[in-house]
Image (tube, grey):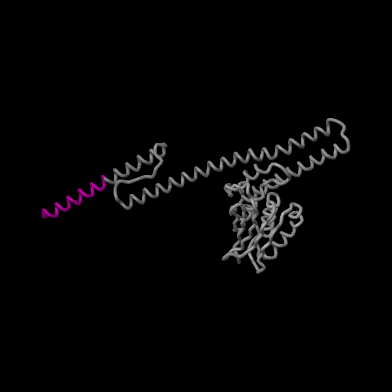
Amino acid sequence: MPLAVIIVAGLAAALCLLRLLLFKREIRGLTKQLRQYNEGEFAGKLAIGMPDRDMEALAAEVNRHTDLIVRANAERRRTEEELRQAVANISHDLRTPLTSIFGYVQLLDSRELSVEERDEALGVIRKRTLRLQALLNDFYELAMIDSTDYALKPTKLRLDKLLPEILMGFHDQMTEKGLAPSFELDARSIEVRADESALRRVVENLVVNAIKHARGKLDVRLEVRSDSAVFTLANEALQLRGTDTELLFNRFYMADASRSGIASGLGLSIARGLMSKMGGSLNAEMRGDTLCLICKWQLI
């Protein structure tokens, strides 16, 4: 065998051996970094010391996997915190009217009351019972919306006809609250595919929320934007300036902010859940001092 061939073969073998040794060093380095990461001694990205496309791809996939683990752990902690907050808020919301009911029942049993006093006590008990009923119904509906068994029956609906009908049902309540509604409803045929009962509940919840919290002018608009039907309620909300509007849809934030009256304070959370089930969206924006609640459905 010619000497040149032997030399070339030897060099090739030496290069292969060197490359193998470099690969083993990189594998040991990656193993060390992963061990440090798992033991909490290292929180950065895995890095390699040799320019090799396959090793770089491996490191990139490992880094992506660790990112997924970090996000999953963060989501788990968030869910656990929400569950803890849910238990605390539900306990508070149920205990408050129950305590009041029990107190008035004891009052009715403890001594003779005048007809007026008895009627007043029964009125409070009735009001607190309605509060309990509203809370339990809304908590149940929230649980059902999150369930995969919660089925809707979508049909073709005309928003330009359905929304004015729903809104007119709240005319007297708006007037009593002193609201000055301004309606801009597109008169064109606006067809979407949605569950009519769920759509009605969404719009009713948004309007009830506005009646409860809005003051003065209330702008109500239905329009077509690109391939979407957009329903917007807007009112001045100085108290929300600087607030993260996503909190408005947090069932626990809303429940915690609504401790009086018959309403449960979970209306916006229910509305968003129903919109999601229907393939639409419900979001909130602050435009200056004005809060805008925006529903979108896909046109058909």
In front of the other: 85 or 163: 163
Q: In the figure, residue 222 lies in which quadrant?
A: bottom right
Picture mark count: 0
Residue at figure coordinates x 34%, y 45% from the top left: 47
The magenta region covers 1-21
From the viewer's perspective, is 65 left or right of 93?
Answer: left
Q: Residue furthest bottom?
A: 188
Residue 107 among those drawn in magenta: no
What percent of the width, then of the height, locates residue 96?
71, 37
Q: Dividing the image into 4 quarters, which one contains the C terminus?
A: bottom right
In front of the other: 8 or 271: 271
What percent of the width, then of the height, locates residue 5?
14, 55
Residue at figure coordinates x 62%, y 58% from the top left: 295
From the viewer's perspective, is 175 left or right of 287?
Answer: right
From the viewer's perspective, is 101 left or right of 227?
Answer: right
Q: In the figure, residue 130 lies in which quadrant?
A: top right
What percent of the width, then of the height, locates residue 89?
65, 40
**Residue 197 vertical placement versus 37 (above, below):** below
What percent of the width, then of the height, locates residue 281?
59, 56
From the viewer's perspective, is 57 left or right of 219?
Answer: left
